[in-house]
Amino acid sequence: MSNAAVVYSMTAFARNSSECEHGRFTWEIRSVNHRYLEPHFRLPEAFRDLEPHLRERLKKQLGRGKIECALRFQPTQGNAQLTVNSELVEQLNHAADQVHAIIGPGNALDALQILQWPGVLASEEVDGKALQAAALQAFDASLATLKDTRAREGADLAEMITSRLDKMNDIVAIVSEQMPEALAAQRQQLQTKLDELSGNLDNDRVEQEMVMLAQKADVAEELDRLNTHINEVKRILTSREPIGRRLDFMMQELNREANTLSSKSLTALITQHAVDLKVLIEQMREQIQNIE
């Protein structure tokens, strides 16, 4: 078995049918996103005892999702063997003879009446344990199909998220290249305004204020954190554990840094880059809601 990491979607559907000597099983399993693992079962009365075993199987295979499992069982027609309870028939016949002795002849029970008597005819007993084992085997096959579907959809989600992360990397790199020029332009703009002011100015104090303004406008830390968070999301996508909640948390962190970048923006172009980052983050966040 491969140890490669697999991203699973929580949205999937599986329908499998299988047969045994006693009938045909049809399982339908539907899975949608949910904060926890929440299974629901619709089972024929004869299979109600299977629910604890089914829950255990789900817990071993799935981490999250609202799971609806429905079983239909169609017994095989024409294979049931009928047996006659000979002892009961003899008792009925003896009782009829006793009644005849009292009320007289002419009211004898015919064969059809005897066959209709409760307990005279019995169908062949089906091995309940074997039937339940067959139902569980059919469920395992359906569950495997569901996991395969979740894995295929999860792979598509992971590819989509990775492509957005790469675009974010490109945007962060562009903003990093633009920042020195933006900071220099801000400094020049402030210097020009100060030169236009009349009166005596404390040059040292002016320089300190300009340095402080430049520090407040500098987004180097935010850009570094964005890169760090992007790399962490990529690492999480390679994890072999359920990752949906961690990815959701990382989207919050990415959005926080994008908001800070927007609030510190020195140019309209950098503001647009921040907006583009937030759009990409929101696109990922929507899809991450479906990841286990």
Image (spheres, grey):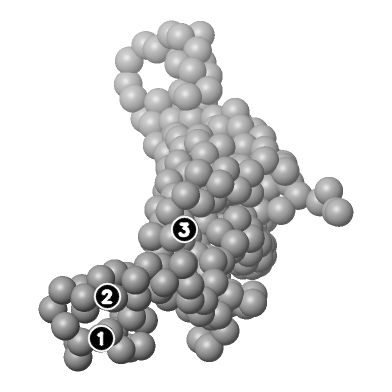
Contact (CB < 8 A) between labels 2 and 3? Answer: no
Q: Can you identify the residue that label 3 sits on?
A: 47
Does 259 appear above or below 217? below
Does 289 appear above or below 105? above
Give the structural element (helix, strand or loop) at label 2. Answer: helix
Quadrant (top left/top right/bottom left/bottom right) for the N terminus: bottom right
- Of the pair 110 and 33, the residue shown nearer to us: 110
Marks 2 and 1, how far apart at CA: 7 Å
What amino acid type is highlighted by mark number 1? Answer: Ala
Marks 1 and 3, how far apart at CA: 43 Å
Contact (CB < 8 A) between labels 2 and 1? Answer: yes
What amino acid type is highlighted by mark number 2? Answer: Ala
Instruction: Point out the residue furthest to the left here.
Output: 103
Does 257 appear above or below 155? above
Expressed as whole percent of the image width and height from the top left, the position of residue 99 reads: 20, 73
Q: Can you identify the residue that label 2 sits on?
A: 96
Locate residue 103 relative to residue 40 in the image: left or right: left
**What mark, if any, has residue 108 been given in the picture?**
1
The reply to whether residue 147 is in sight is no
Marks 2 and 3, how far apart at CA: 41 Å
- Of the pair 255 and 138, the residue shown nearer to us: 138
Locate residue 236 relative to residue 116 in the image: left or right: right
